């Protein structure tokens, strides 16, 4: 079986940035499972996997355009401390889910001032060229329900 639309694909992967630093890896974890062709993973990786056979090993370089997008300076903003009402202590590096016009977004606290907080709405990997080493583990047909939901059902999951 080959990787194609509406297959559930399990992959082991290592993700490095341009300087060779490991950013993420499935090592010592369950492989990552996703439904191919549904935009569950970044386009550059999804495209590279199309047509791959089980056990195939793939090295792929993903540009920001095919990854997490470019960084946009206008997504770095100062907001009043009152926007964090209910948070005990706001610290640099904290991440929050924020509702925006473009849908839910993860924002990262950059700097904390007396009355204002500088936040960054860019994805942490925006602007990065990413290097993936991937090994295809298993490939199977997605169930009708999985296709309808747009996500993989593991044991006992809905
Ligand atoms: Zn579901």
Image: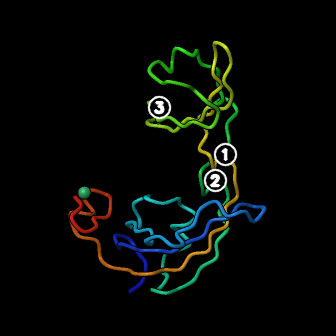
Residue 65, numbered circle: 2
The quadrant of the picture occupied by the N terminus is: bottom left
Is 110 displayed left or right of 41 in the figure? Answer: right
Vertical placement of residue 3 versus 37, above or below? below
**In terms of image quadrants, where is residue 140?**
bottom left
Distance in Å between CA atoms under marks 2 and 1 = 7 Å
Which of the 4 image quadrants contains residue 16? bottom right
Q: CA distance from mark 3 to mark 2?
A: 23 Å
**Image x and y of residue 55, in percent:** 49, 87
Report how far apart the C-alphas of labels 1 and 3 lie in the structure: 19 Å
- In the shown orientation, is residue 39 left or right of residue 158? right
Element marked by disc 1: loop
Which residue is labeled 3 in the image?
A: 98
Residue at image x 60%, y 56%? Answer: 67
Horizontal side, residue 142 vs residue 106: left or right: left
Q: Picture coordinates of residue 101 (x, y %)?
A: 46, 29
If you read the primary sequence from the N terminus, does the residue marked by circle 2 or circle 1 appear first?
2
Where does the image place residue 2, in percent across and percent down from the top left?
A: 42, 83
Residue on which disc 1 sits:
70
Residue at coordinates 75% horizontally, 61% vertically from top-left? 18
**As drawn, 56 above or below 115:** below
Q: Secondary structure at mark 2?
A: helix
Q: Quadrant of the C terminus?
A: bottom left
Q: State if disc 1 and disc 2 touch (CB < 8 Å).
A: yes
Q: Sequence-wise, which precedes: disc 3 or disc 2? A: 2
Q: Is residue 19 above or below residue 143?
A: above
């Amino acid at each position: 079986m080959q990787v194609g639309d509406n297959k559930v694909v399990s992959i082991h992967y290592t993700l490095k940035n341009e300087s060779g630093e490991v950013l993420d890896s499935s090592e010592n974890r369950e492989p990552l499972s996703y439904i191919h062709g549904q935009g569950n993973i970044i386009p550059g990786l999804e495209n590279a996997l199309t047509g791959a056979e089980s056990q195939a090993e793939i090295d792929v370089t993903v540009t920001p355009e095919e990854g997490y997008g470019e960084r946009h300076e206008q997504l770095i903003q100062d907001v009043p401390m009152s926007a964090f009402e209910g948070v005990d202590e706001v610290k640099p590096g904290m991440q929050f889910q924020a509702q925006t016009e473009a849908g839910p977004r993860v924002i990262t606290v950059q700097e904390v001032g007396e009355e204002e907080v500088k936040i960054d709405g860019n994805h942490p990997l925006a602007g990065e060229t990413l290097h993936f080493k991937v090994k295809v583990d298993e490939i199977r047909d997605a169930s009708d329900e999985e296709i309808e939901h747009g996500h993989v059902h593991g044991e006992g999951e809905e």
